[in-house]
Image: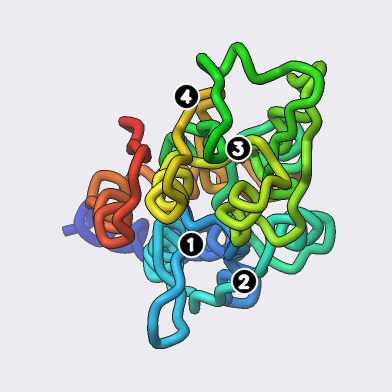
Amino acid sequence: MRGLRWIVLTMMIVAPVTALAQSVIDAELAPGGKLRFGLNGANSTVVTRNADGTVGGVAPELGRFIAGKIGASFVPVLYATSEAYTDSMEKGEWDICVTGRNPRADMKFDYSPDVIAVEYVLLAAPGKEFGDVSHVDRPGVRIGVARNASADVFLSRSLKSAQLLREPDGVANVVELLRDGKADLFATGTGVALDAAARLPGSKIVGVFHKVSFAVAIPKGRSAAAQGRLTALVNEAKAAGVVTKAIEQAGLKGVQVPPN
């Protein structure tokens, strides 16, 4: 009996400490019990707009899952353009987000395991011929891109001769830009490119120029315990099919779910 009483007493002492430690960790991810989730509304690969005005897609579904697991309310913080979304990263307007890994983001965030991997392609305007992506970077070639998007970050560092045309409205004007002859190509994710090609007869995909991994990101400076908690939650969401289901519901193309 003495042994049993000791076990019970130990559990009574340890349990509140464990619960307190867990709540502190979760509070790092969702201060005040609210998980403010940054969303790039211009990137249909991670965010989709529903008919009722709500948001869906990979990022919101992950946000809802994580919020539910840590007992927080899900608060979507939506930005209409990639430029506005990127600017928000310096303002502390949200707690976590889903973003593409790139050198610019690497300086600001720590990441969960990869959530999705997206192929980025070049879509050529009607009448424009390029053998493959290696023939694109030459004088006189104009490449449209969503300002501050992953494609912009990559091409800004890699192009030597072609001109980069940064669109402040993101991918909203892809078809018009190529149809009106303002750009020779547009660089974007496979899904966006395929949708645009279907609406623009004569356009065609030249090829893949980059592959971007997206992960859940938190600002640097959070504890190792909070990072570990986020990693576990993201892996749990992937294992439960949350990401795969979001991809299927959004009808995304060229998007893969990396293994844990």
Q: Position of residue 124 (x, y in %)?
A: 55, 34
Q: Which mark is residue 47?
A: 1
Left or right of residue 201, residue 147 in this image: right
> Which-is-in-front pick, marks 2 and 3?
3
Please tell me which of labels 1 and 4 falls first in the chain: 1
Please tell me which of labels 2 and 3 falls first in the chain: 2
C-alpha span from label 2 to label 1: 9 Å
Q: Amino acid at mark 3?
A: Ala
Q: Amino acid at mark 4?
A: Gly
Residue under pointer 3? 187
Left or right of residue 138, residue 110 in this image: left
Quadrant of the rendered image containing residue 42: bottom right
**Secondary structure under the numbered disc 4 in the rendered image:** strand
Q: Does 56 sit above or below residue 100?
A: below
Q: Does 139 sit above or below residue 19?
A: above
Q: Which mark is residue 78?
A: 2
Q: Are marks 1 and 4 in contact (CB under 8 Å)?
A: no
* Residue sitting nearer the eye, 129 or 48: 129
Q: Amino acid at mark 1?
A: Val
Neighbor class of circle 3 (other Cα within 10 Å; few <14, some 14-19, many 20+) is many
Please tell me which of labels 4 and 2 falls first in the chain: 2
Q: Residue, x 25% and y 45% (percent of image)?
A: 239
Please tell me which of labels 3 and 1 falls first in the chain: 1
Q: Are marks 2 and 1 in contact (CB under 8 Å)?
A: yes
